[in-house]
Image: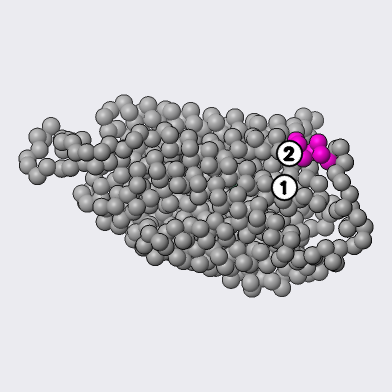
Amino acid sequence: QPKNRKEIFGHPAGLFILFFTEMWERFSYYGMRGILVLYIATSATAIDPGLGWSNKDAIWLYGWYTMLVYVASIPGGWIADKFLGQKKTVLFGGLLLCFGHGILAIPQDWAFFTGLILIILGVGGLKPNISTMVGGLYQEGDIRRDSGFTIFYIGINIGAFLASITVGFVAYYYGWHYGFGLAGIGMLIGQIVFVWGQKFLKGVGEFSGGESASEAEKLARKKPLSKIEKDRVVVLLISFLIVIVFWGAFEQAGGLMNLYTDSKVDRTVGLSWLEEIPAAVFQSLNAGYIIIFGTVVGSFWIWWKKKGRESSSLFKMAVGTIIMGLGFVFMMFASKEASAEAFGKAAMFWIFLAYLFHTIGELCTSPVSLSFITKLAPLKYASIMMGVYFAATGFGNRLAGSIGSSSQLEPFQGEMIVSKQEILPFISKDSMKIRNQEKKIVTIYDYPINED
Ligand code: LEU
């Protein structure tokens, strides 16, 4: 039982330690995620060299990375249950994350891949266990538990929102590695908050090791699952199929939609200090919408219930998936508009609309699945089910990578002669950066180009 009784805004003070730790951890995760695909795909010949891979390969690597970060939740949860307890596993995961993000800031290939591996291990240790710790702040039956999770989810998205904007701009103006470095500073702040806040987390996420558990608890854990419990696990596993489909579409955001925004969306704002909005900054829309609409969607379902029309969790998840899917209709309009002329671009508001629908869908699906797990999972499998849930979102992310990368044409190899008008959209105003496009290698011959 939590021993520290200090409260802030009617919640255990420890909630705010977890809130700020996770806010900064997500700042680093989403900051880095926002520029990752752009960095991999940016031409190696540009001023600040990216890896210069094709879009197809960039999305493919992105898919593997975003799968593995969440699949690592399974060993992360297991280590906490078996050896360390959640608190120490979070601490250890956080440390790996500080190193991982720090190393990413070094502009060398070995650093890039080492950084990615450390981040995968770090998120695996931190993410599932900090979520379980939130639950551990409340005693069984405490009605504040749900609102505690809502507050926590908003913290996640404040971090994501701030990161997409700041890291997006820093990477755009100063270079990718400064962006990665800023993400790392965020993680360092998170780690400091967590260490400093230990006094508010006494008795939460401690390793019980089975020794300190009461006899009754030990006997309950030894008992085989009842028929009802087994059925519940089956229902949970089936619901994870929806989770995979949902994230398979949703996670186009950081990959395909990010690259699309970069190359096919008119991002010019024409201000004296800001010519165009960097593509990565659009990744903040999802988090921004969650901060605005998070409570609205929650209240809608409460209102719905009051009208006597309570819907099941599975129904809400299905509705959420459909709403999210509708968001892609706007992307269809965007791509119609962009392809209307040879190198045309689509208006920004299509992206705004697409992410709005994606977010409403997420709000119907994601928090509901979390509470669904805590309701249905048998106690002795609670952590591992949470790990499997995050792994399911990871498999969804992998699916997203496959879909996104198979939508890309094989890069054009060779040289072609193009008119000035054709080449202009590939070159930024200072005519130095050649953005990575499907037609990748373009040679500009040094003789007068026909003006039209
Ligand atoms: N936005 C969520 C988070 O970062 C996504 C997760 C549930 C896969 O926590």
Circle 1 residue: 385
State the image coordinates of residue 62 (x, y, percent, origin top left): 46, 47
Q: Can you say whether 47 is above or below 348 in the image?
A: below
Is residue 429 visible to us here?
A: yes
Most foreground residue, 169 or 96:
96
Q: Can you say whether 351 is above or below 209 in the image?
A: above
Secondary element under disc 2, as helix, strand or loop, is helix
87 on left or right of 270? right
Q: Which residue is pictured at 74% across the width and 44% down the height? A: 373
Q: Which residue is pictured at 33% across the width and 28% down the height? A: 339
Quarter of the image where one finds residue 421: top left
Q: Of the two numbered discs 1 and 2 on the same chain, state the one appearing first in sequence.
A: 2
Q: Is mark 1 within 8 Å of ligand 1?
A: no
State the image coordinates of residue 41 (x, y, percent, origin top left): 36, 47
447 on left or right of 223? left
| Crowding at mark 1 (Cα within 10 Å: few <14, some 14-19, many 20+) | many
Most foreground residue, 142 or 10:
142
Amino acid carrying mark 1 in the image: Met
State the image coordinates of residue 420 (x, y, percent, origin top left): 16, 38
Q: CB atoms at circles 1 and 2 under 8 Å apart? A: yes
Circle 2 residue: 236
Residue 69 lies in the magenta-colored region:
no
176 on left or right of 164? left
Image quadrant in which the N terminus is located: bottom right
Residues rendered magenta in the picture: 229-236
